[in-house]
Image (cartoon, rainbow, N blue to C red):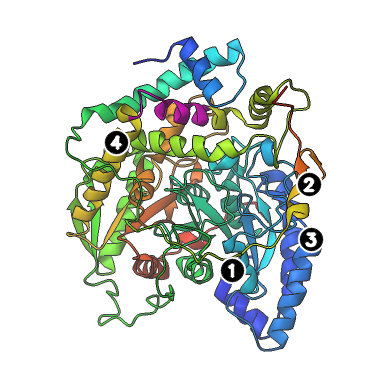
């Protein structure tokens, strides 16, 4: 049951071979048993989850089931859910019980999904290892001495350890894709504007995007069908007709042995230079060869400004973060210092005590680059480079349909290995941040194992709104391979 | 470029984050390492490139001018650090 896909679980529920209450209770039991070893979940509320499961069973009995009805889903602790503590991994919000639901949470509730609990993360999603959160690091289910990736590391570990059939995360610079890669699961960051940001803790608003994390591309498609959609409360939510992201999964191919015939896969030469670990390079090469075997054509492309994406990102994201996080002042909600003098002192002490080191670092970077005299040299310059990066992709998609390469330059590293060196930590995002800067969709799927038997992720990126095409290509790869079915040894 | 210690403290003040001397010194080293990475941006000529503020080139939507929110101040204030008579309490700012 814990290895079943969403479609299989849905079928078991529909055939009454399994009830949502049984499924939810089994997941809760497994979380209770395994979570102390991984620190993937921050909050569990069995009563609430089981109440939702009972309601789902009633829907199923009434013949009103939708594809996700009765299926437990783990939520990154950045999505506001009414009555649930929503901490964003921060001491600042350690006691914040949300008075409302995020749009994504409303959508999942309306679809009959069961909220299994809230997952651990880097504080305010700022990090690439899920070590910066107030509640301690997430441990990788494949090796507990290593990081799970971040910032959606709790969601990735929850799915990898088979504690949750699926999870939701957010991706500002790779925070869905990189932990998915490091934990051996799948995750997709949709086109910017597809999933509403309403009720999602804001980090960098022009980059933040929610998305699903699951065991297979097919599961991601089912989740995205529910998560995507117009929402008037997010001013950047896109008004466009609803799509069925599963529609291309089973498209009949003219040549069954070559289902991807005609697909042009761009491989950026800049993504295979120095800094890429040899085990990751080898696994990605093997995956590309598999795609060619399935009929796809490989095209070498160039993204000339790829190397500037990390520098530009670490100006733009902190700038937006410094503005977004100014709302945490100890007045309306969140942490307030126990002792203070005047109002300014109350702000300064509450923020100094409520935020962790990495969040403070980014607020300082952002405040500096936006301050008088530095705006042009940093923020404006970064925005111009952002344009160049978007133009690189526009040119590349004249030559190819999808772009593939590594998700992360190495497999999961040891806990603490990069925690004291921000620059080394930021450079991990080298292959993922460009998609956020351009607003393009990108996903990661497992494609092999490397050093220490750790999973490796293949990044599949597409043009705006190419999610169905990306998911279909990933699905064909997963029909021909079994990397996505592997699970951590000894996690029973 | 590199940030001096007084600059680090000034930025922390602008961000309303209390910082001790020891914290400022530690932050100085780390921030300067990060700015060295960021400086790579200066290697590319961006003359004539229009800045890109946003991924989607769409106009801001306008909404109908009507009441859409119910009064939930009691619920919202139930999670506030300090309230009295429906008001948020802060230290006195006017003598």
Nearest to N terminus: mark 4 or mark 1: 1
Where does label 3 land, which residue?
Answer: A46
Mark nearest the camera among 3 and 1 is 1
Where does label 1 land, which residue?
Answer: A107
3D distance between C-alphas at marks 3 and 1:
21 Å
Q: Report helix, strand or loop for mark 4.
A: helix
Look at the image and say whether residue A363 sits in the magenta stretch.
Answer: yes
Toward the viewer: A215 or A278?
Answer: A215
* Labels 2 and 1 positioned on one and the same chain: no
Q: Report helix, strand or loop for mark 2.
A: loop
Kindly report the secondary structure that dominates the magenta region of the rendered protein.
helix
Whether tag 2 and tag 1 are in contact, CB under 8 A, the answer is no
Residue at point 46%, 39% (across, down) = A320
3D distance between C-alphas at marks 4 and 2:
50 Å
Magenta-drawn segment: A361-375
Q: Residue furthest toward the front?
A: B95
* Labels 3 and 1 positioned on one and the same chain: yes
Indicate which disc residue B86 carries: 2
| Visible residue check, residue A354 | yes
Residue density around tag 4, few if under 14, some if 14–19, many if 20 or more, within 10 Å: many
Tag 2, which chain? Answer: B
Look at the image and say whether residue B24 sits in the magenta stretch.
Answer: no
| Visible residue check, residue A135 | no
Q: Position of residue B26 (x, y in %)?
A: 53, 15
């Amino acid at each position: 049951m814990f290895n079943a896909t969403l479609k299989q679980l849905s079928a078991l529920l529909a055939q009454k071979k399994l009830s949502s209450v049984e499924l939810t209770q089994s997941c809760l039991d497994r979380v209770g048993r395994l979570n102390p070893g991984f620190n993937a979940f921050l909050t569990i509320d069995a009563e609430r989850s089981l109440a939702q499961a009972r309601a789902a069973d009633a829907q199923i009995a009434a013949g009103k089931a939708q594809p996700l009805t009765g299926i437990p889903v783990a939520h990154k602790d950045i999505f506001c859910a009414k009555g649930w503590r929503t901490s964003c991994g921060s001491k600042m919000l350690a006691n914040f019980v949300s008075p409302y639901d995020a749009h994504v949470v409303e959508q999942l509730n309306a679809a009959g999904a069961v909220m299994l609990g809230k997952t651990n993360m880097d504080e305010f999603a700022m990090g690439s290892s899920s070590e910066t959160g107030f509640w301690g690091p997430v441990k990788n289910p494949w090796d507990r001495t290593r990081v799970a990736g971040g910032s959606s590391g709790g969601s990735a570990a929850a799915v990898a350890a088979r504690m949750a059939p699926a999870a939701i995360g957010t991706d500002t610079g790779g925070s869905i894709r990189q932990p998915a890669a490091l934990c051996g699961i799948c995750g997709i960051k949709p086109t910017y504007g597809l999933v509403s940001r309403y009720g999602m803790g804001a980090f960098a608003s022009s980059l933040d995007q929610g998305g699903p994390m699951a065991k297979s591309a097919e599961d991601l498609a089912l989740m995205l069908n529910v998560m995507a959609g117009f929402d008037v409360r997010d001013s950047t939510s896109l008004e466009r007709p609803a799509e069925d992201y599963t529609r291309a999964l089973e498209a009949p191919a003219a040549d069954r042995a070559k289902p991807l015939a005609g697909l042009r896969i761009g491989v950026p030469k800049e993504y295979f230079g120095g800094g890429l670990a040899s085990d990751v390079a080898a696994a990605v090469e093997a995956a590309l060869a598999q795609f060619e075997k399935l009929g796809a054509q490989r095209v070498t492309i160039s993204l000339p400004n790829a190397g500037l994406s990390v520098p530009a990102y670490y100006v733009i994201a902190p700038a937006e973060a410094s503005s977004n996080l100014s709302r945490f002042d100890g007045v309306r909600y969140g942490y307030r210092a126990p002792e203070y003098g005047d109002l300014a002192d109350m702000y300064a002490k509450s923020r100094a005590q409520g935020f962790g080191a990495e969040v403070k670092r980014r607020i300082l970077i952002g405040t500096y680059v936006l301050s008088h005299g530095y705006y042009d040299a940093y923020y404006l310059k970064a925005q111009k480079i952002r344009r160049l990066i978007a133009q690189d992709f526009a040119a590349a998609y004249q030559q190819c349909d999808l772009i593939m390469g590594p998700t992360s330059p190495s497999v999961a590293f040891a806990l603490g290995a990069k925690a004291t060196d921000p620059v080394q930590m930021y450079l991990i995002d080298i292959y993922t941040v460009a998609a956020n800067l351009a607003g393009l969709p990108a996903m990661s799927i497992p494609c092999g194992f490397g050093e220490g038997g750790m999973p490796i992720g293949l990044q599949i990126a597409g043009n705006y709104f190419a999610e169905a095409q990306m998911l279909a290509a990933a699905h064909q790869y997963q029909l021909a391979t079994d990397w996505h079915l592997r699970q951590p040894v000894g996690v029973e | 470029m590199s940030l001096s210690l007084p600059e680090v403290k000034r930025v922390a003040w602008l961000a309303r984050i209390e910082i001790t001397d020891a914290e400022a010194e530690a932050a100085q080293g780390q921030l300067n390492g990060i700015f060295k990475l960021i400086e790579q941006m200066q290697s590319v000529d961006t003359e004539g490139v229009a800045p890109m503020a946003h991924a989607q080139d769409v106009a801001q939507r306008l909404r109908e001018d009507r009441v859409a929110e119910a009064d939930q101040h009691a619920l919202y204030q139930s999670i506030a650090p300090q309230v009295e008579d429906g008001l948020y309490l802060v230290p006195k700012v006017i003598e």
